[in-house]
Image (cartoon, rainbow, N blue to C red):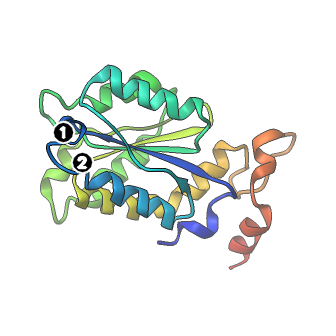
Amino acid sequence: MSGRRHLPAGARARVITVSDRAYRGIYADRSGPLLVAGLVELGFEVGAATIVPDGRDEIVAALRSAVADGVDLVVSTGGTGLGPRDVTPEATREVIERAVPGLAEALRAAGRETVPAAMLSRGLVGTVAATLVVNLPGSTGGVRDGLGVLAGVVGHAVAQLRGADDHGHPAAGSAGPAAAVDAAAVDAADAG
């Protein structure tokens, strides 16, 4: 995955697995650990996946906790389908401030050639404060496809949320998080 060289230094992510059965220990969470490994490969600092049941309040609380902890990226896996307990998008809509529909559509499109049901995912993408929030399906294939899409854009998104301009350079007059952008790495990437 190519996202590592564009990722600002010290970028942190959190993974939230949304699954009644994994939460109850009926089966092992497979998509969460796969997502953690993929985000680590992209260069994020990531702890173990947090597992919550398919409940709107629990999902909202997990998302808000990640934002309060100041992570750059929070990615959920599960709860995006049409089932009666699939409420991850509704919970996410309650938390995000700005939608990023283009990324949500790209994530949906990524797997539809091999899995036509991918277009049934209702996952959302948006931002709250300086955190990017992404919903992925609960399948390992959906996570792999999602990581492939994120690899190309997540570094740029994190840099912008930290205050960088469209080219990854600290924006004029910005302070705080923008100073954390690894400008040398961005300059090297722009030159290459």
Q: Position of residue 160 (x, y in %)?
A: 66, 47
The numbered mark at residue 94 is none
Left or right: residue 125 compared with residue 81: right
- Crowding near pointer 1: few (<14 within 10 Å), some, many (20+)? many
Instruction: Check residue 138 in the rendering and tell me which mark sits there, or answer none.
Output: 2
Q: Quadrant of residue 167?
A: bottom right
2 and 1 marks in contact (CB < 8 Å): yes
Distance from label 2 to label 1 (Cα)?
A: 9 Å
Sequence-earlier tag: 2 or 1: 1
For the point 28% across and 54% down, which residue is it?
31
Can residue 117 be seen here? The reply is yes
Look at the picture and state if 57 lies above or below 74. above
Please state which amino acid type lies under the numbered disc 2: Gly
The answer to whether residue 128 of the structure is visible from this angle is no
Q: How many residues crowd around disc 2 within 10 Å: few (fewer than 14), some, or many (20 or more)? A: many
Looking at this view, name the residue that lies furthest to the right: 173
Measured from the top left, where is residue 100 in percent x and y? 46, 40
Indicate which disc residue 81 carries. Answer: 1
The residue positioned farthest toward the front in the image shown: 25
* Image side of residue 156 versus residue 178, left or right: left
